Image: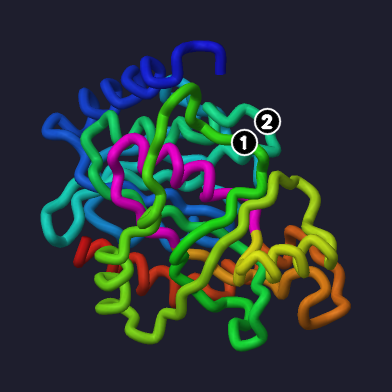
Amino acid sequence: MSADPRRLAGAAAAMINQRWAPDGLDLAFVLGSGWANAADELGEPVGDCPLADLPGFTKPAVPGHGGQFRVVRTATGRTAAILTGRTHYYESRDVTAVAHGVRTVAAAGATTVVLTNGAGGLRSEWPPGTPVLISDHLNLTGASPLVGPTFVDLTEAYSPRLRDLARRVAPALPEGVYAQFPGPQYETPAEVRMAGVLGADLVGMSTALETIAAREAGLEVLGISLVTNPAAGTLTGATLAHDDVVRAGADAADALRALLVGLAGVL
């Protein structure tokens, strides 16, 4: 992404506001692996387009991501953007492309973003299909979307207020620490053990870099992982495959849809 990232986010935001949100966005949902099928009931449709039609965006490279940008009006009258897909760091090692989605929705007026993902679980009590609130993260990519002396406080990177609201919708939601690896290879059992020693409960290939950029842009962040598989070496000797991630999302679609609809009603 060669253009100035904030200028490019501003161009995408201007197109969004001109087409669908003249008064600006209120919130946004970024739907990761396993979550895209839950997008259809979040509100009354206002407009949509392929993500790649907006400045700075590209078509998602990962099967199971919808690749659409939607604007809806929620039941509470708020204007929400839905991104069914994201750019992963492993696609080009371009961290500004990873951050472009959250920077765009912030530039379009959003003050809250819900970041979702599919993750490997390190805890036996969280079988595939379990949604988990992210309480904190470990950025193990070796990268940052911030450049220069941009000192952003990440003490409460994942908003306690929003996590409390999420538990109003689903009181039994557990929470844990998410570790982002660079990918695209799945983590080795040794890497998973390392992440566990460092305090991780979940491992994946997204979200942490977006959260850093979102906090720098002033967004309040709610992060939710869907446990799609046991992390390598933790519970079973089974091999990992992306088809299993997609299947876990499909199997959990009804529960994820209910959770997201509930969140749209309180955020």
Residue pictured at 30% horizontal, 26% vertical: 13
Residue pictured at 20% horizontal, 66% vertical: 266
Residue pictured at 29% horizontal, 50% vertical: 220
Residue 148 in view here: yes
Residue 258: quarter of image: bottom left
Give, as a three-letter code, the residue at label 2. Arg
Q: CA distance from mark 1 to mark 2?
A: 9 Å
Describe the element under mark 1 as helix, strand or loop: loop
Q: Report if residue 86 lies within the magenta region.
A: no
Describe the element under mark 2 as helix, strand or loop: loop
Give the number of the mark in front: 1 or 2: 1
Residue 160: quarter of image: bottom left
Instruction: Assign the C terminus to one quadrant of the image.
Output: bottom left
Disc assigned to residue 143: 1
Q: Which residues are magenta?
A: 204-223
Q: Residues within 10 Å of mark 2 (few under 14, many from 20)?
A: few
The residue at which mark 2 appears reads as 93
Q: Report if residue 206 lies within the magenta region.
A: yes
Looking at the image, which is closer to me, 155 or 107?
155
With 267 as the anchor, is 179 left or right in this view? Answer: right
* x and y percentages locating residue 216 in the rendered image: 36, 36
Instruction: Assign the N terminus to one quadrant of the image.
Output: top right
Looking at the image, which is closer to me, 59 or 200?
200
Mark 1–mark 2 CB contact (< 8 Å): yes
Residue 241: quarter of image: bottom right
Up/down of 38 relative to 1, above or below: below
